[in-house]
């Protein structure tokens, strides 16, 4: 193989760092993975150690290179995607604690951390125009409320801050020393407006008490497009990753957005056709990505973000804060479950298949679940929403766990339908879901995503569409293609389409009617409790 004709995509998720070595046609040659630590010192608090993350990235890259049998000088480019976690460094670039423990090791607020609920509500109460580009409601999973929380609770640490990064931008900084930031991260999580003359609304930052954010965080006035070449790896980074300083580094992106690029790559050149296709990146949580040629504001759904995935397209993002995590919780909370490992999920799935042979789609038909156990990200945009289970009995057998698991899967799929309805009501014409992530390994969810939504479901041929999306970015940064869209089309892998079962429609239409009624009843119950 000619020299420097491979690229590496690195994905940092909630629990691990993964790396993949790819060819210029999108073929995955080798993959590596290494776990990362999470610290949870209090309810709704979750923290990472950024040094641990960088070490895990190095280990994952070494493992991927070994699996691919690739030499360091064969790697033309590398890029990074990551969760929207928040990294804080002091003015000497050393880790700065975000933790109530004060331990500087924990310098990263994890995306799922909900400590800033009150601050998010204050952001929403400003009614500032930046809210028009986050669905009208600020989420505690975004960065400005978390930064408010940090400054409010630890002003001394805020005063010592010198660098503040979204995790993907931290990784490119570690790789190159560059302080450029991705338009993906800033537009989607920092209230940066990529479509106008005033990118940062300083009046908004002043209103929420972090008017010095740009200076405190070493943030640029202008963001950089995904895939822009930042230069070669620094000598230290090359040593850490087992590569060479000739390897070019591209501006990165958020993990779900990498997945969206990986599965929607075949449509990026058609601004009208792409509005029929939705990316569902589903694992611990679920992200729902829709692209359009024109801005389509949708209440309760993040965006529209300009240039947050491709330079000439707008992006709307919905999601479920807990989907795979909810199924794990259902197992752990049930006396017949306890351990939510892969073997248990497979055992439950096999038993559900057997029970359905006898009872069909009416299995546990009076059992209904609202899946908002970690709030409702969209389309209700209510971080205070709670989960509901209706229809329980005294049965504590393994079969009762299987029935509850099945109906929770139904609820997760109906939650996706809820988001689809909101998007299509505002001008989208989505009829095809492209699913990637851990849920592709769950046959119940893959079936339900088609049957409960009435949409075609495409399972990507790529073994790991998130890594593939980031590899596309790396290939563009390495100059192997004219631009990111060209790289995406050249490296896309297609997929296999599943059509919904028309015989299942009436059952899930009834379930959806119950689902919507349960949302309404939850609001009514909360209203009763709020009375004096």
Image: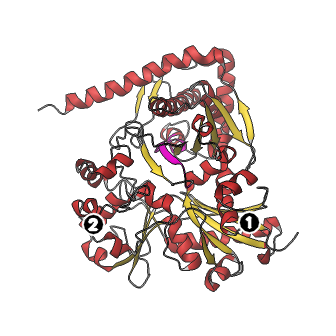
Q: What range is drawn magenta here?
A: 311-326
Image coloring type: secondary structure
Above or below residue 498? Residue 96 is: below
Task: Report, in whole angstroms, how far the alpha carbon at label 1 lies from the one at label 2.
Answer: 41 Å
Give 512 or 314, whichever is nearer the viewer.
Answer: 314
Instruction: Tell me the residue that label 1 is attached to.
Output: 480
- Residue 391 in view here: no
Q: Which residue is drawn at 46% across and 50% down?
A: 305
Left or right of 212 on screen, residue 187: right
Residue at the limit of the structure toward the front, as seen here: 197
Q: Does the magenta stretch include residue 348?
A: no
Q: Name the residue under label 2.
A: 210
Secondary structure under tag 1 reads: loop
User: In the image, is residue 324 part of the stretch drawn in magenta?
Assistant: yes
**Residue at position x 48%, y 70% in the image:** 49
State which quarter of the image contains the N terminus.
bottom right
State the image quarter where residue 391 is shown: top left
Residue 164, x across and y down, in percent: 41, 71
Identify which residue, 381 or 231, lies in the foreground. Answer: 231
Image quarter for residue 7?
bottom right
């Amino acid at each position: 193989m000619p020299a420097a004709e491979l690229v590496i995509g690195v994905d940092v998720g909630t629990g691990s760092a993964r790396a993949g070595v790819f060819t210029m046609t999108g073929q995955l040659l080798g993959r590596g993975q290494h776990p990362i630590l999470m610290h949870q010192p209090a309810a709704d608090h979750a923290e990472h150690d950024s040094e641990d993350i960088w070490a895990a990235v190095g280990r994952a890259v070494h493992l991927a290179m070994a699996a691919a049998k690739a030499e360091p000088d064969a790697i033309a480019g590398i890029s990074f995607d990551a969760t929207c976690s928040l990294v804080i460094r002091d003015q000497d670039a050393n880790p700065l604690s975000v933790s109530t423990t004060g331990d500087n090791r924990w310098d990263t607020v994890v995306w799922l951390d909900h400590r800033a609920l009150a601050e998010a509500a204050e952001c929403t109460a400003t009614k500032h125009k930046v809210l028009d580009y986050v669905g009208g409601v600020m989420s505690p999973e975004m960065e400005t409320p978390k930064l408010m929380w940090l400054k409010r609770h630890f002003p001394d640490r805020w005063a010592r801050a010198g660098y503040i990064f979204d995790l993907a931008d931290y990784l490119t900084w570690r790789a190159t020393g560059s302080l450029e930031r991705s338009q993906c991260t800033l537009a989607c999580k920092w209230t940066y407006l990529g479509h106008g003359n005033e990118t940062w609304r300083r009046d908004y930052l002043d209103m929420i008490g972090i008017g010095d954010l740009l200076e405190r965080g070493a943030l640029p006035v202008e963001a950089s497009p995904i895939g822009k070449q930042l230069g070669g790896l620094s000598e230290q980074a090359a040593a850490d990753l087992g590569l060479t300083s000739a390897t070019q580094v591209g501006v990165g992106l958020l993990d779900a957005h990498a997945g969206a690029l990986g599965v929607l790559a075949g449509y990026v050149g058609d601004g009208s056709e792409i509005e029929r296709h939705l990316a569902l990146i589903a694992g611990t949580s679920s992200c729902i990505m829709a692209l359009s040629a024109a801005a389509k504001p949708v209440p309760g759904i993040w965006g529209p973000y300009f240039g947050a995935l491709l330079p000439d397209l707008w992006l709307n993002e919905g999601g479920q804060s807990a989907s795979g995590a909810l199924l794990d919780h259902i197992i752990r909370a049930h006396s017949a479950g306890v351990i939510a490992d892969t073997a248990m999920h497979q055992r439950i799935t096999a038993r559900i298949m057997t029970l359905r042979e006898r009872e069909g789609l009416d299995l546990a038909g009076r059992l209904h679940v609202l899946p908002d156990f970690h709030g409702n990200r969209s389309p209700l945009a209510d971080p205070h929403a709670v989960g509901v289970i209706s229809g329980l009995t005294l049965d504590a057998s393994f079969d009762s766990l299987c029935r509850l698991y099945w109906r929770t899967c139904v609820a997760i799929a109906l939650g996706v339908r809820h988001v689809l309805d909101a998007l299509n009501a505002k001008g989208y014409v989505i009829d095809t879901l492209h699913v990637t992530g851990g849920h592709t390994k769950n046959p119940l969810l893959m079936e339900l995503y088609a049957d409960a939504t009435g949409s075609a479901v495409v399972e990507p041929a790529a073994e790991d569409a998130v890594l593939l999306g980031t590899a596309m970015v790396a290939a563009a940064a390495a100059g192997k293609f004219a631009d990111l869209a060209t790289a995406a089309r050249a490296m896309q892998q297609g997929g296999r389409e599943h059509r919904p079962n028309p015989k299942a429609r009436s059952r899930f239409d009834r379930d959806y009617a119950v689902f919507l009624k349960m949302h309404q009843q939850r609001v009514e119950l909360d209203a009763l409790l709020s009375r004096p």
